[in-house]
Amino acid sequence: MSLEQDIKQAKFRNEHHKASINIIYTYNWVMERQKALFDAENITPQQFNILRILRGSAPRPISTLQIRERMLDRMSDTSRIVDRLVLKGLAGKKTCTSDKRLVDISITDTGLKLLQRLDAKNAEMDATLGALSEDEVKTLNILLDKIRKPD
């Protein structure tokens, strides 16, 4: 279906306006599909993002500030999300030995196993963009990077 059909809007100010709306609409469409995978593991997309960051830094722990800098959604309350991951046993938290003002966060074995289960579902996650060829996905990545380039 086209954007016009999906949102029942036939006119846009111009193609730039339409593209902006299309990006927002597509982001929400993708997130809805991903949410079903995360719900099956009882985590949120933000929790998945933090677990992904922690796995990338393992075995070294990192601070909540470092996590926030790497978050896809930088508006998230990183400390609160980390606390929920700790309560679920997916992450560990301890005072930094070199700077007592900081807290070191690391992924637990349980958190790694959860990510492995999600990794096994990569085909489902990749299917979100399954209508695109490998070359089209590469072009999409180039265009999205280009949008974010500073003027």
Image (cartoon, rainbow, N blue to C red):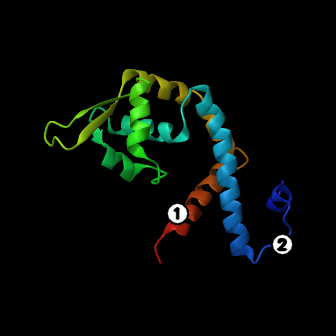
- Residue plotted at (44% across, 24% down): 88
Rate crowding at label 1 as few (under 14), some (14 to 19) or many (20 or more) other CA atoms within 10 Å: few
Q: Foreground: 136 or 47? A: 47
Give amino acid for label 1: Asp
Q: Is residue 94 above or below residue 10?
A: above
Element under disc 1: helix
Q: Foreground: 122 or 91? A: 91
Element under disc 2: loop
- Residue plotted at (81% across, 58% down): 7
Pointer 1 residue: 145
Q: Is residue 31 left or right of residue 146?
A: right
Point out residue 98 in the picture as x, y percentages from the top left corner. 13, 40
Point out residue 99 in the picture as x, y percentages from the top left corner. 15, 43
Q: Foreground: 47 or 115? A: 47
Pointer 2 residue: 11
- Residue plotted at (32% across, 48% down): 66
Give amino acid for label 2: Lys
Q: CA distance from mark 1 to mark 2?
A: 27 Å
Rate crowding at label 2 as few (under 14), some (14 to 19) or many (20 or more) other CA atoms within 10 Å: few
Residue 95 seen in the figure? yes
Image quarter for residue 135?
bottom right
